[in-house]
């Protein structure tokens, strides 16, 4: 009996290690990577998946905003400048409004409770979940 329990525990441990290795291989992207993917006409959903929903050097901007700015024709330097960590050139703090967005980065509803960008959210009356974006 204990051999069966140990066998199941070992199977679970192996599955956990394999899943951990697979999920650890995803990493956040750089702004240049996102711009290149947008220029290559890769879908937003695929970019979010490849970048693990994160971008490293975009200051206060979420990946969905970086994708949108790249689609609007901005280069990596312009995106980084616009996404400086909440401070404009005059030293004023920018007010950031958070939204619940769908998988393509489209804003579905404004967030009532401020939550971390990229976390899961839900809009009342809309089926399914989204993610918090700016």
Image (tube, helix red, strand yellow):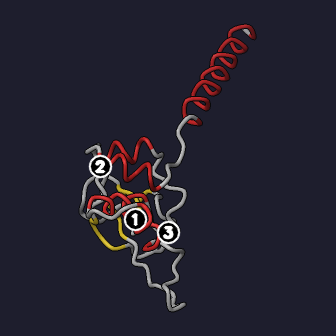
**SS at badge 1:** strand
121 or 47, nearer to the observer: 47
| Residue beneath disc 1 | 133
Q: Is residue 82 left or right of residue 20?
A: left
Q: Which residue lies at the image location 73% right of the left edge and 14% below the top edge? A: 6
Q: Label 3 crowding class (10 Å Cα cut-off): few <14, some 14-19, many 20+? A: some
Could you tell me which quadrant the N terminus lies in? top right
Q: Quadrant of residue 27?
A: top right
Residue 16, picture quadrant: top right
Q: Classify mark 3: helix, strand or loop.
A: loop
- Residue 99 at what x, y percent from top left? 36, 69
Say above or below: 44 vs 19: below
Q: Measure how far apart labels 1 and 3 are at the Cα level.
A: 10 Å
Nearer the observer: mark 1 or 2; the answer is 2
Task: Work out whether mark 3 precedes mark 2 in sequence or the reverse, and give the earlier one.
Answer: 2
Q: Residues within 10 Å of mark 2 (few under 14, many from 20)?
A: few
**3D distance between C-alphas at marks 1 and 2:** 22 Å
Reply above or below: 1 against 116: above
Instruction: Judge by depth and name the residue closer to the eye, 89 or 5.
Output: 89
In the rendered image, the vertical position of residue 30 relative to residue 93, given as above or below: above
Determine which of the numbered discs, if any, sits on residue 40 in the image. Answer: none
Q: Nearer the viewer, residue 59 or 4?
A: 59
| Separation (CA) of disc 3 from disc 2 | 31 Å
- Badge 1 or badge 3: first in the primary sequence: 3
**Which residue bears the numbered disc 3?**
115
Residue in the picture at 28% in, 53% down: 104
Mark toward the start of the polypeptide (1 vs 2):
2
Pointer 2 residue: 39
- Helix, strand or loop at label 2? It is helix
Identify the residue at image location x=53%, y=60%. Answer: 57
Residue 132 image offset from top left, x and y in percent: 41, 63
């Amino acid at each position: 009996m204990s051999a069966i329990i140990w066998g199941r525990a070992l199977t679970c441990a192996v599955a956990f290690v394999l899943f951990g290795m697979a999920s650890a291989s995803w990493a956040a992207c750089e702004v240049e990577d996102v711009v290149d993917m947008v220029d290559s006409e890769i879908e937003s959903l695929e970019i979010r998946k490849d970048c693990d929903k994160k971008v490293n050097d975009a200051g206060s901007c979420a990946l969905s905003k970086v994708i949108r700015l790249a689609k609007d024709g901005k280069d990596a330097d312009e995106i980084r400048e616009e996404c400086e960590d909440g401070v404009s050139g005059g030293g004023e703090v920018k007010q950031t409004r958070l939204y619940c967005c769908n998988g393509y980065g489209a804003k579905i509803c404004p967030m009532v409770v401020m939550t971390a960008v990229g976390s899961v959210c839900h809009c009342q009356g809309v089926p399914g979940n989204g993610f918090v974006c700016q």
